[in-house]
Amino acid sequence: MLMRCYFMATKDKPNNRNLRALFSVICLFIISLGLIVYFSTQSTGNTQVNEATTVKQTQTTEVQKRVTVKETETEKTTAQEKSTTAADEKTTAVTEAATMQQGDTNTPYKSFYKYPCEEKIISGYTEELVKNDTMGDYRSHTAIDFACAKGGKVSAVNDGLVIAVEKDNLLGKVIKIDHGGKLVASYCGLDTVNVSEGDYVTIGQTLGTLGTVPFELNSDSHLHFETTVDGKSVNPLDVMGKSE
């Protein structure tokens, strides 16, 4: 009987080994499945990170595009500024060209000048303060008042370019003429005007007729005649080579 039991126990040993092997295979399978699930999860996480990185790169591209637009606008502004500068230079060139060219016949202090109306002078040039009967004050009289009847003709003292025709509260209607050599003459107190700004005139040409000079109404009828050289007041008689 004992021998039979021993024999059966010995016979069951291979079955036990098979069971252990089976359990080992099952464990390995479970471990492998766990590893597969783990790495699959890690792979999904990496994909999300990569996608986030791609979005960031797209945003960077958009920022670069905005910078490019700004630079384009800056280039347009610079081009407009250059265009404006060029236009200003062109305007300046035209302004400089529109001046009376000095010649042998209209050189200040040397050329021959005609009187703008009669030769009689009722008030001379002075930089000192003198009494003004109309205004009731003292002021300098940087002009020559040539006697002339109201409605009488006023003529150009030399060739020139009309640079302004305007009305002044004190001087009345005024014609300003560039006579060359930086000499500008103002014919003040006119009634009618025959020329316009931009006209070229010749010596002795009629500019208009005489009216009144508002701030010298108490004086006899006259043409108030002022001259400047390079913007500074000068005695018209000295420029014209005339004397009182």
Image: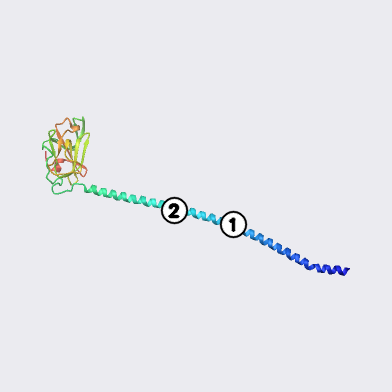
Give how far across and how far down residue 16 sits, in percent. Answer: 78, 66
Dot 2 or dot 1: first in sequence order is: 1
Image coordinates of residue 19 in percent, x first then y, are 76, 64
Residue 243 left/right relative to 55: left
Residue drawn at the location 88% of the way across and 68% of the way down = 2
Query: Which residue is nearer to you in this view: 7 or 123?
Result: 7
Q: Say whether residue 241 is visible.
A: no
Compared across the picture, whether 20 is left or right of 149 comes to right
Most foreground residue, 93 or 79:
79
Mark 2 vs mark 1, CA separation in Å: 32 Å
Of residue 182 and residue 1, the one placed in the foreground of this image is 1
In this figure, which residue is indicated by the disc labeled 1?
44
**Residue 79 visible in the displayed image:** yes
In the figure, residue 51 lies in which quadrant? Answer: bottom right
Tell me, yes or no, whether the two marked residues, 2 and 1, touch with CB atoms within 8 Å.
no
The residue to which callout 2 is attached is: 65
Amino acid at dot 2: Lys
Asked where in the image residue 3 lies, by quadrant, the reply is bottom right
Q: Residue furthest left?
A: 119
For mark 2, does the 10 Å Cα neighbourhood hold few (<14), some (14 to 19), or many (20 or more) residues? few
Q: Please name the residue shown 72% across and 64% down the image.
A: 24
Q: Quadrant of residue 188?
A: top left
